């Protein structure tokens, strides 16, 4: 069964700093990996989706990379802002489980003004 | 982009009663939907896969008689928590996979259930 972990569990940075969130998955046979943002008490907002054939995806200040062979993905946030404060979740879709996604444990990010 | 809605967004019920949560895909059809549960400060845990026209598939440890799932149409799946207890209090989120080539998922806004 696919296991997805995220490091660190919590991160606090001053505004303007660049930061990296890490996501690891045990089974490299995936269709894609998706990064989400979740604000307290709210649902999920999709940030970036990386297909298994891709190495990275970019959207604004966000850049996500994927290294399938090593079972790792990173989410890079440039010039962090207080509005970026939220929990970030990664989810991997294994090849052999249909449309099911396995979620990581999440990283709680606080950007200090 | 595709939208998935949930209703209600929050509900408070008494112990022993049943609660129904609806998940709708608003502008696309979904033969499969997923139900997740999230406890405070924890990640999402898949509960079951809802299949239109057939029985739901439950994850290990999830009681199918307690969490009834009905995929009534290509745009609607419902989760009914029967005989709810305080330990069922949680955040329930549904999702539906994209029909396009990207094969991502669209998530509903979630339903906060509190059982008193």
Image (tube, helix red, strand yellow):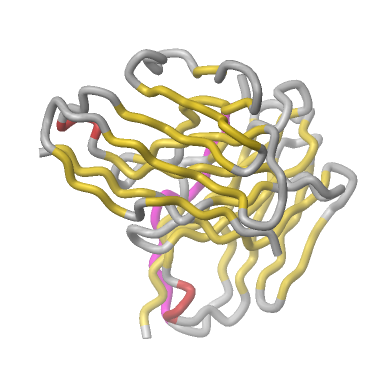
For the C terminus of chain B, the quadrant is: top left
Query: In the rendered view of the protein, which quadrant contains the N terminus of chain B?
Result: bottom right
What residue is shown at x 39% (from left), y 59% (from top)?
A42
Give how far across and how far down residue A13 sits, in percent. 42, 72
Q: Is most of the magenta stretch helix, strand or loop?
A: strand
Over which residues does the magenta segment extend?
A: A3-14
- Observer-nearest residue: A52 or B35? B35
The residue under the point 51% across, 52% down is: B108
Does the magenta-highlighted stretch encompass residue A9?
yes
Q: Position of residue A87 (x, y in %)?
A: 44, 58
Residue lying furthest right in this view?
A: A53
Residue B9 occupies quadrant? bottom left
Q: Is residue B31 above or below residue A41?
A: above
Q: How far across and how far down the image is residue A40, in percent?
A: 34, 61
Asked whether, in this view, residue B2 is left or right of residue A16, the answer is right
Q: State the residue at coordinates (45%, 79%).
A: A83
């Amino acid at each position: 069964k696919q296991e997805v972990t995220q490091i660190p569990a919590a991160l606090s940075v001053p505004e303007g700093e660049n930061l990296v969130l890490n996501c690891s998955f045990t089974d490299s046979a995936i269709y894609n990996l998706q990064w989400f943002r979740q604000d307290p008490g709210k649902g999920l907002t999709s940030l970036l989706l990386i297909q298994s054939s891709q190495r990275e995806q970019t959207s604004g200040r966000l850049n996500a990379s994927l290294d399938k062979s090593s079972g790792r993905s990173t989410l890079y946030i440039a010039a962090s802002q207080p509005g970026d404060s939220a929990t970030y979740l990664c989810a991997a879709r294994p090849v052999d489980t249909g449309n099911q996604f396995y979620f990581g444990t999440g990283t709680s990010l606080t950007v200090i003004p | 982009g595709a939208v998935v809605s949930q209703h209600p967004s929050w509900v408070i019920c008494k112990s022993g009663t049943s609660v129904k949560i609806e998940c709708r895909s608003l502008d696309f059809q979904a033969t499969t939907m997923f139900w997740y549960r999230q406890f405070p400060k924890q990640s999402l845990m898949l509960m079951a896969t809802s299949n239109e026209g057939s029985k739901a598939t439950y994850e290990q440890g999830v009681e199918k008689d307690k969490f009834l799932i009905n995929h009534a149409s290509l745009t609607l799946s419902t989760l009914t928590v029967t005989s709810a207890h305080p330990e069922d209090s949680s955040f329930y989120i549904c999702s539906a996979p994209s029909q396009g080539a990207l094969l991502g998922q669209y998530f509903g806004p979630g339903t906060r259930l509190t059982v008193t």
